[in-house]
Image (cartoon, helix red, strand yellow):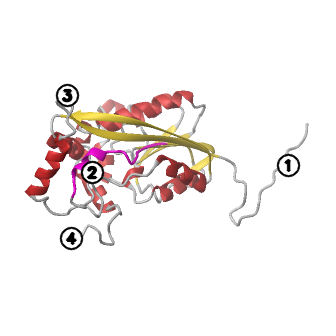
Amino acid sequence: MNPDNALSGFVDAAQVGRRFSRIAGVYDRGDFFAREVDRRMQERLDYVRLTPARIVDLGCSRGASLAGLAARFPAAEVLALDNSQAMLVAGREPRPGWQRLLGLGRRGGQRICGDVERLPLAGGSAGLLWSNLVLHWLDNPLPALAEAHRVLEVGGLLMFSTLGPDTLHELRSAFSDGYAHTQRFTDMHDLGDMLVECGFSDPVMDMEVITLTYDSVDALFAELRAAGSACAMKARRHGLTPPGRLAAMRQAYERLRSDGRLPATFEVIYGHAWKARPRQTADGRAIIRFERGR
């Protein structure tokens, strides 16, 4: 396969779905990084004044974010959406029989199998959209952000995290075979521009770098596989990597070893933006509002 062909640079969406569905039953053993990012996102809600009637977790996987959101907004209906039916099923914890009879013990509400780029939700139907580490799995975040704007009510909030271009730069630099070995990650400033393009107001973007360390490259690969985070670009190598290439990669990565450990960088981008009242109609005419004097 020629890595410079026309497929280069695009996400293999089917491969993303297969990988996450394959690990759905054991995802809670490998999602510690996603849970840590979710915890940091939830802390950011401490500074937000919002009382949503409906919350939608976009790309919820097994739904680990739902309990925290439901506890923070107890009056809200919380919906969970993911494109992997296996993840949605795996996230449904069995309840004792007496709870099922009384309708008690269920957290997270309805679970919906759907695509974040084509949400099966009515326009203006959500007060808070939550998305943890989903956007970098898309070929282009823009359609998903546009859908989020459509589904939010006026005054509603989109809050998300994703990974930025510095993520796994050590792994990329260690390979020299011309194939993709990580996802393609969107720059924080480009995401901010996309939010404005979709009609969001007051987008706020920030970033932090989290460095994890490993005993070996194999330990890093094992953790990425457990989290469903192996490369799913169409320009990845589809067959086995030749032993010589692997040996060269390991040798290059070993040069980065410090204090007996190998580093792996994750650039985590956080963003939130509000849906303001429209300034023009769908056909481009300006909307002028007259406020009645007191």
Amino acid identity at mark 3:
Asp
Distance between the alpha carbons at the discs numbered 4 and 3: 39 Å
Distance between the alpha carbons at the discs numbered 4 and 2: 19 Å
Side of 236 where 132 appears, left or right: right
Q: Which residue is mark 2?
A: 172
Q: How many marks?
A: 4
Residue at the left extreme of this rendering: 243
Q: State yes or no: discs 1 and 4 in contact (Cβ < 8 Å).
A: no
Side of 126 where 290 appears, left or right: right
Residue at the front extreme of this rendering: 255
| Res 1 label | 4
Helix, strand or loop at disc 2? helix
Amino acid identity at mark 2:
Arg
Residue 85 seen by the camera: yes
Q: Quadrant of the C terminus?
A: top right
Image height of 9 relative to 202, above or below: below
The residue lying toward the viewer, choosing from 180 and 12, is: 180
Amino acid identity at mark 4:
Met
Helix, strand or loop at disc 1? loop
